Amino acid sequence: MATSNLEQTLHYKSPAKEWSESLPIGNGRLGAMVYGGTKREILQLNENSVWYGGPQDRTPKDAFKNLARLRHLIRTGDHAEAEKLVEQAFFATPHSQRHYEPLGTLTLDFGHDPAEVKNYWRGLNLSASTVDTEYEHLGVRYKRKAFASYPDDILVIQLEASERTEFTVRLSRYSDREYATDEFVDSIEAQDGTIVMHGTPGGRNSNNFCCVVAVRDLACDGKVDTMGNCVVVNSSKAVIVISAHTIFRHVDLETTALTQVKKSLYNHADLLGRHTRDYDSLYGRFKIRLFPDASHIPTNERLFVTPDPGLIALYANYGRYLLISCSRPGYKALPATLQGLWNPSFQPAWGSKYTLNINTQMNYWAANVCNLSECEDPLFDLLERIAYRGEKTARVMYGCRGWTSHSCTDIWADTDPQDRWMPGTVWPVSGAWLCTHIWERARYTADLKFLERMFPVLRGSVLFMLDFLVEDSTGSYLVTNPSLSPENSYIDKARQKGVLCEGSTIDIQIIDALFGIFLESVNTLKIKDELCDPVKKTKNRLPPISVGRFGQIQEWHQDFEEQEPGHRHTSHLWGLYPGGGITWTKSPDLISAAKVTLRRRAENGGGHTGWSRAWLICLHARLHDAEGSLGHLDKLLRDSTLPNLLDVHPPFQIDGNFGGCAGIVEMLIQSHEDGFIHVLPALPEGWKSGELSGVKARGGFELDITWNESKLKKVVVRSAVGLKTKIILPDGKIIGIDGIGYHRII
């Protein structure tokens, strides 16, 4: 029974009955959800370029000619006419971008009656990146190990039994619609122990795909036969390898996939070794442990055991595992979608796209601090394509230079408005938010080559904002118009419901950060740029963050009443987290207002989705509110976490996993204030002992932190580039770092 290293393992006493109980594996491109069945093993398969339909031209052609009128209607508070005009001239046709689809389903039919199974165990070992299944059936011992290899670019299932057993391997692509059929499959053929499936995700110009499953007997007395479109195996030891590709990356799909599986089968002896060495080079950089730990309890039962700090550490490590598994660098790499890599539905929630008004960004909040910066590379690859396509959107819709994007994008980097939903569709600020990730990466890694590469993207977003900003109704400030606070609504002074506005708070906070990042980048790269003067002048004309009548940070430029005061988005606190403009040292008055804002959200039911709860953890951590963060973390685990520890909105969204991971680490270390690293800034009373090692801080620093009985025991600081900083310890003591490359123990 696989009981070692339970501290790093999600484990269970029974097979998954449904998708929400299955366990994920992935190599960034290929993924599977493993059920661990005895009668039938199921692997739901994904390949991250299997999307319905090809590129679209959806840019609203009449937007710019109606922009001045729309701005006037918004300034004068004519909500009905403004929304009518948006529906007519600013919504795109067709209204939706493309959506992500599953690749198919692999089944292994063993026929082992669950009633006759004994000593069942399955688990996901985070430190090895394997899903293991073990059980006994009628005196025969069975073991399976599934993993997704990045170096070999395949999925692998290794099978062993104490004596020969027969099972059947099938590959299908069943729809989750009302009728059961193979969806968009052109052919499924089997020959010589190999199954080949060809198909299309549907829609015009979509990415045709090919999936290959190959089986090899590893026992001297076993055999592999082909029957119909299935493979029948009779052996005590076998290996199954899976490859799949689409025309998004390759032309000769079948040859590419067959070559991969044949090469992998030829070198099968070290498949696991190559996989674990590669995976450990990422996962092994960082460690988090919290005590006490109840890892002997099955994971689904631990969700209802309190307190269990060890479960929180497991959740953080799971976030790192998921990021490594669904976002790796590579040729035409794609970032994590709303469901990461793992989507079982042909009609997924919100299309399983890239939602850019927080969700995609949240997917990468933990990347740098958890020492996984290169896992964010696919996001920057997509961002470069967004910037290219967004030039047309900026020009045609708004008459602006540079580039822009709206609330969502897809595999084709579509930048036009998504949906026909007034509270979220026309929001051309998402690209600026994405650009803040460029600077965060540079701050953590001090990688000037990366900053040079991404500077044109950053500059293009700045150029758009310089053109897009207009004077507000008072003539005092420059603001966005049209604007909105993502997905929320307000009640104006005339008691009318509104959505569109001038200069929502999140817009101004993001643009202020964008302009600051641009100026910092120019200085860091030691270049001259003609935009510097207009950026400085425009930045000075942005409105300040305002405090409203309740003592809260206003969500809108005017002190409107919230239509939904417990809304899931806390957009007006962007400057607190993930931004860094609201700090204890620079703006203590806004810190106080942020506390009021969070209290009002909580009193009205805020945080009712998984990702929203994760954001609240991060926000309370920035306020050094340890117990507030812990309270939301406990609710995230109890109310918004599936048995397999995946986040649920509901339905499943992966952003809460990454946001929750980032929040846990934010409670233990913060470096957003230039020149300072806070150690244990929001340590809860219940986390009496623990350790954090390999954690990154801005400025090119890496730290190890150990505490016991709620007291700091040791801090090790390593510098990659030799910048100066100050370490703020939990007792308030400040230790200066001298600015040379060093390895120092405090």
Image (cartoon, rainbow, N blue to C red):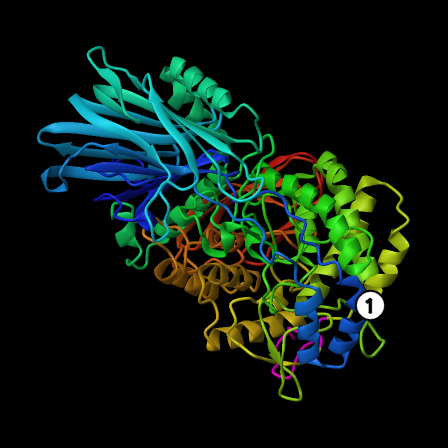
Residue drawn at x 78%, y 68% as measured from the top left? 66
- Please state which of residues 139 and 368 is positioned toward the viewer in this rendering: 139
For disc 1, the marked residue is 470
Q: What range of the chain is rendered magenta?
A: 545-557
x, y percentage for residue 299? 29, 48
Residue 187 covered by magenta stretch = no
Residue drawn at x 68%, y 51% as measured from the top left? 436
The amino acid at mark 1 is Val
Residue 220 placement, left or right of 154: left
Is residue 1 visible to the viewer in this orientation of the structure? no
Residue drawn at x 71%, y 58% as measured from the top left? 60
Count of marks, rendered view: 1
Residue drawn at x 39%, y 50% as measured from the top left? 646
* Mark 1 residue crowding within 10 angstroms, few (<14) / some (14–19) / many (20+): some
Q: Is residue 527 above or below residue 494?
A: above
Query: What predominant SS class does the magenta segment belong to?
Result: loop
